[in-house]
Image: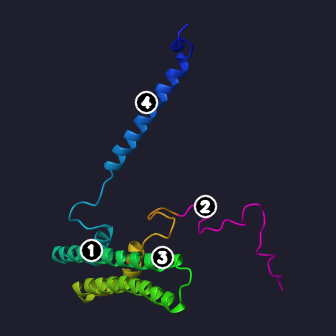
Amino acid sequence: MSYFNRNKWWVIAFILLITLNIATITAFWLVRDRRPGPPPGAGSGVVDFLVKEIGFDSTQKQKLIQLRSQYQQDIMEARKNNRAAKDAFFALLQQPDISDSALAKAARASTVADQQSDIITFRHFQQIRKLCNETQQKKFDNVLQEVLRMIAPPPPGKQQGLPPRRGEGMPDGPPPGGDDRRGPPPPQQ
């Protein structure tokens, strides 16, 4: 009896698993490539939100899209500088005897990069507010905090747009294991 006949089912199962793996990887590639991106030139959800809530006309919308494009370029550059400053700061860990002044200088460079991002964002919204007439400025002032939440990066470890999972910022009672370290409630008088 040949080797193939003795192990026929193992060979078939192996070939089937290889085929399924190839199909799965191909499906992931195809789905990833078909994800819809923002429509070209249409801006983002923030632009649409502002246009709807504030009541921008078509000219204001075009200027807003231009401002948004410039802002994205500026903020990407600022984030790149911020990342470089933080990398340089933590690269100091490789030096065994780093002085406090050198450490403070690297920390200040990182802080300056953070400040630059905040200033870019402030100036961006200042320019948007200048696009508005008096009535629109009042509407803008009312929705600004919501817009800032929309553009904020997600907290570390979370994807933007998804609700928090159980246990992530949503207290549901005592921690697992029944060990409630909060203590007993205060006595009622």
Kindly give the residue lying farthest to the top in the view shown.
1
Specify the amino acid type for callout 1: Gln
Disc on the earlier residue, 2 or 3: 3
User: Which residue is labeled 2 in the image?
Assistant: 166
- When the figure is inspected, residue 104 is found, relative to residue 60, above or below; the finding is below
Write down the residue under mark 3: 91
For label 1, the residue is 73
The answer to whether 4 appears left or right of 132 in the picture is: right
Task: Name the residue rendered at 47%, 26% in the picture.
Answer: 16
Cβ–Cβ below 8 Å for labels 4 and 2?
no
Residue 137 lies, in percent from the top left, at 29, 87
Cα distance between the residues tagged 4 and 2: 37 Å
Q: What segment carries the magenta color?
A: 164-189
Identity, as a three-letter code, of the amino acid under mark 4:
Thr
Q: Secondary structure at mark 1?
A: helix
Q: Earlier in the sequence, mark 4 or mark 2?
A: 4
Real-space Cα separation, disc 2 to disc 3, in angstroms: 36 Å
Tell me which numbered mark, 3 or 1, is placed earlier along the sequence.
1
Residue type marked 2: Arg
Where does the N terminus fall, quadrant-wise? top right
Q: Nearer the viewer, mark 2 or mark 3?
A: 3
Q: Earlier in the sequence, mark 3 or mark 4?
A: 4
Which callout, 2 or 1, points at the residue further toward the start of the chain?
1
State the SS at label 2.
Answer: loop
Residue drawn at point x = 45 percent, y = 31 percent:
18
The reply, left or right, for residue 24 in relation to residue 35 is right
| Residue appearing at x 46%, y 69% in the figure | 154
Instruction: Classify residue 189 by image quadrant.
Output: bottom right
Residue 102 in magenta stretch? no
Whole-percent x, y for residue 108 in the image: 45, 89
Residue 169 lies in the magenta-colored region: yes
